[in-house]
Amino acid sequence: MNGDVTSRSTPVPQQTSCNAPSIQCQEQRALNKHEVGWRRIVRNFTPSWFSVTMGTGIVSVLLNSLPYNGIWLYWIANVIFALNVLLFVAGCVVSFLRYVLYPEIFKAMIMHPVQSMFMGTFPMGLATIINMFCAVCVSAWGEWTRNFVWALWIFDAAVSVMIALSLPFMLMAHHKQSELSSMTAVWLLPVVTCVVAASSGGVVADVLPNPHHALWTIIVSYVLWGIGMPLALMTMVIYFMRLTLYKLPPKTVIVSVFLPLGPMGQGGFAVMKLGASAQNIFPKTHTLEGSAGSTFYAMGFLTALILWGFGLVWLFFASASIVQCRRFPFNIGWWGFTFPLGVYAASTCQLGRELPSTFFSVLGTILSLCVVALWIVVSLGTLKRAVTGDIFHAPCLAEIKPKQEEGRDASKAA
């Protein structure tokens, strides 16, 4: 008897819902439409995906500038460089579609306390392309590439400054009150953009044909370093306090403990490159005294050596944290392994070139090869989960649904 009643009663609500479409049904169909296929990828394509270009780009830079190199590594670096350009362009296209087709997502992303921080990955990914363009394309494609890459760097520097200043201010003024226990090292991503742009400025200055253009590139790069590096150090103090008071972050974001290596490595590499460029450009442009360039160079090396030593501290903390956690889930945050370790390896190799030192050259080569191995592992894991679609997830979309429900309730009341 109960089974008969159930079988008769169940078709009634299904028939009503199908034959009497309502606002809720239409919204549900629209939601289902945008949660499958390419629309799901576009909607869930967060700025954190540009960390893929950061990791891929630093691998190409390392392979191109290894202390112990070969022509075969040069061609491998070029292939990875071309792949990185393709990934960056694809990321820009998908991001454009995301915010044009779904403009409400942009505000939700900007107001999200974590996802907004990943906007810094865009200029840092572009900076790796600029560095490789200077190393490979300038000598092969002619004089026009020098001014082109300079314009590209100016754009990158401007975007870096906007992100480094605006996102921390929004965290202070517009985001909901944050607990110290919820802080992660992703707070470093916006401010480190200026340090990365400064390091690229040192690379770009070496290829500019006009010494005065190179001089202003060096000066602006020092200013960028001054914006980003102190902010990064202040953020690291807060992060160290968070770790000591509330212990290690959850396993889902444990990889973020490697992020403090980024400003240490990139800051040291930047100040060494700028010092070497100043030593070359200052005498040509009669800037300051004749020995000013050598002073900048010596101070840059000293600063880089200190930052490298400080980086050893964070390398130990990060490695010990990973060992203690043992197992942790794979997600897009695993790309946090590659870029911080990569720029630290680049700084180590640069120290070996400036001394010169066999110790730093060998250590830099070992670290670089470790970064390449990590890049292969993370790339395969990302590709596997991208095919299944499991890795596409945007936490900021959760903020949109409650607002849609509020709008639906308001329309009902009206």
Image (cartoon, rainbow, N blue to C red):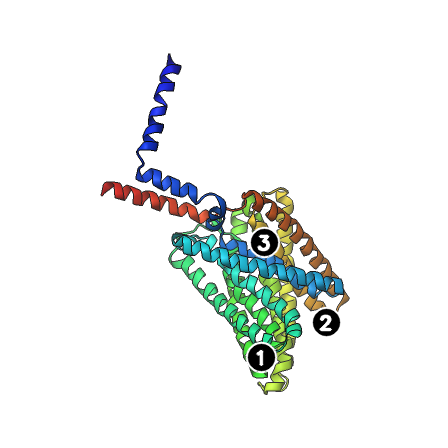
Which quarter of the figure has residue 87?
A: bottom right
- Whether the residues at callouts 3 and 2 have beta carbons within 8 Å, the answer is no
Quarter of the image with the N terminus is top left
| Residue sticking out furthest to the left | 414
**In this rendering, which labeled residue sits more in front, label 3 or label 2?**
3
**Image location (x, y in percent) of residue 144:** 59, 77
Q: Is residue 147 above or below residue 337?
A: below
**Would you name the residue on which mark 3 appears?**
336
**Would you name the residue on which mark 1 appears?**
214
Q: Which mark is residue 316?
A: none
In the picture, measured across the screen, residue 44 lies left or right of residue 215, that is left
Disc 1/disc 3 C-alpha distance (Å): 32 Å
Who's the residue at 56% across and 42% down the image? 388
**Would you name the residue on which mark 2 appears?**
355
Q: Earlier in the sequence, mark 2 or mark 1?
A: 1
Q: Is residue 254 above or below residue 50?
A: above
**Between residues 403 and 137, which one lies in front from this camera angle?**
137
Disc 2/disc 1 C-alpha distance (Å): 25 Å
Q: Is residue 172 visible from the viewing direction of this image?
A: yes
Who's the residue at 45% across and 65% down the image? 165
Q: Amino acid at mark 1?
A: Ala
In the picture, measured across the screen, residue 190 lies left or right of residue 383, that is left
**Image location (x, y in percent) of residue 205:** 60, 76
Q: Earlier in the sequence, mark 3 or mark 2?
A: 3
Around disc 3, counting alpha carbons within 10 Å, would you say few (fewer than 14), some (14 to 19), or many (20 or more)? many
Q: Amino acid at mark 3?
A: Gly
**In this rendering, which labeled residue sits more in front, label 2 or label 1?**
1
Quarter of the image with the C terminus is top left
Q: Secondary structure at mark 1?
A: helix
